[in-house]
Amino acid sequence: MKFATKAIHAGQEPDPSTGAVMTPIYQTSTYWQKSPGDHQGYEYSRGTNPTRKALENCLAALENAQFGLAFSSGMGATDAVMKLLLPGDEVITGDDLYGGSYRMFTKIFANYGIKFHFLDLSDPEIIREHTNANTRLIWIETPTNPTMQIVDIAAVTKIGKEKGLLTVVDNTFASPYLQNPIDLGADIVMHSVTKYIGGHSDVVMGALMTNNEDLYKRLFFIYNACGATPGPMDSFLVLRGIKTLHLRMKAHCDNGRKIAEFLKTHPKVDKIYWPGFADHPNHEIAKKQMRDFGGMISITLKDADLKETFRVASSFKVFSLAESLGGVESLINHPVTMTHASIPKEAREKVGVVDNLLRLSVGVEDVDDLLDDLKQALS
Ligand SMILES: *Cc1c(COP(=O)(O)O)cnc(C)c1O
């Protein structure tokens, strides 16, 4: 099946009890058993729930995976992956990570004896130099947040396989519509479903997808044992959001391209980060592994200090100043004080997260209104 058909149908059969075409919201914590242990596959909703199960099958299909697990947040999904590890294990990851992942790695899992190497992965060969007998896992994000660097997924998974390491890709920024890491050799794909997959900024959720049955079983054990699983109402909302994922992504990409081109020559804009430009340092890799370039764009403002940057960030009328991304509505974010506030100044400045940086999540409104809003805010 092609992507659009999977987005609308995968995992969703008419409900066996009533024929309802849309998956019902099974708002129940527990399930009747005829005699102890004699049930219809559902015992307790922390472990399994029919609405969530339909969603998980759909999520798996979108990433060309056999298995999917939904979590109550993206961080809940990341936490489950890290719990595959033991004290003494080492992880290789990028130096331009989502702030919450950096915080979890350095402030939680480092205390449990897991060692993290934060590397510039623009040349994946660097992974070899930092791999030793304790290395277990590579965690990558591409495009990176907020400076839209591209990591070559196929090159990373090749090294991972050679060295016997698991490769996990946080695919939140691209969405399954633009990029499918499992097809490029990844063992696990992670999503913050909160973003493009949910698409309407009304649910917080995460997901893991894999083709490896043994990994799926271990992750399911952690999911049920630790309990960061989402409820049926949120599962329903995400199933509903996914039905337009392909349509929304096309509109995000079209609007994103027009806005990136407008900003590139704007006199108030110094640097612009968007992988669709031919002069982006990893444009060729982006072209190879992504279907299009998305609606996430970062800019630095020319000759602007923090005060001036705040003034611009606060003068939008259609874009909302808010954290998060990937919803139908356009958002503007100031990474230094908002999404990336938990990363120390030196670490973030090294990768370009500076005071005059703004990140745009281009929504699917009429692009003329978005362009007008940018013109007035930048002037
Ligand atoms: C938002 C986000 C997360 C965390 O997901 P939550 O759903 O907010 O817990 C992880 N990675 C990336 C790239 C994100 O944008």
Image (cartoon, rainbow, N blue to C red):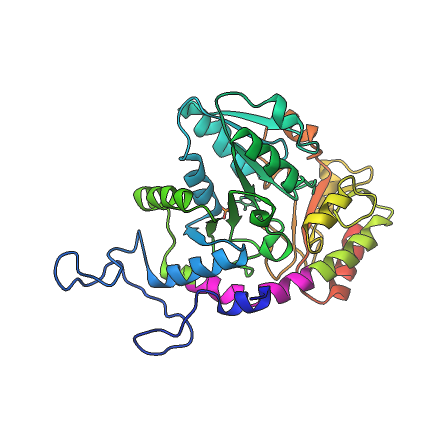
Examine the image and state in which quarter residue 77 appears: top left
Quarter of the image where one finds residue 254: bottom right
> Magenta segment, which residues?
236-252
Which residue is outermost to the bottom? 19
Q: Is residue 89 above or below residue 359?
A: above
Task: Specify whether residue 149 is painted magenta.
Answer: no
User: Residue pushed farthest left?
Assistant: 35
Looking at the image, residue 301 sits to the left or right of residue 97; the answer is: right
Across and down, in percent, residue 352 comes to 71, 34
Estimate the x, y position of residue 239 in percent, counting from the top left. Answer: 47, 64
Look at 77% across and 65% down and name the residue there.
368
Looking at this view, name the residue that lies furthest to the front: 162
Quarter of the image for the N terminus: give it: bottom right
Q: Main secondary structure of the magenta part?
A: helix
Q: Position of residue 347 (x, y in %)?
A: 63, 27
Please tell me whether residue 109 is drawn above or below residue 368 in the rendered image: above
Which residue sits at x=45%, y=45%?
212
Q: Nearer the viewer, residue 106 or 185?
A: 185
Name the one closer to the observer, 137 or 95. 137
Determine if the magenta segment contains residue 238. Answer: yes
Q: Is residue 132 left or right of 316 when viewed as pictured?
A: left
Q: Nearer the viewer, residue 130 or 174?
A: 130
Residue 2's spot in the image, x, y percent? Answer: 59, 66
Q: Is residue 10 visible?
A: yes
Q: Is residue 7 left or right of residue 274?
A: left
| Number of on-image labels | 0
Relative to 16, is 195 on the left or the right?
right
Tell me the residue at 47%/50% (across/down).
207
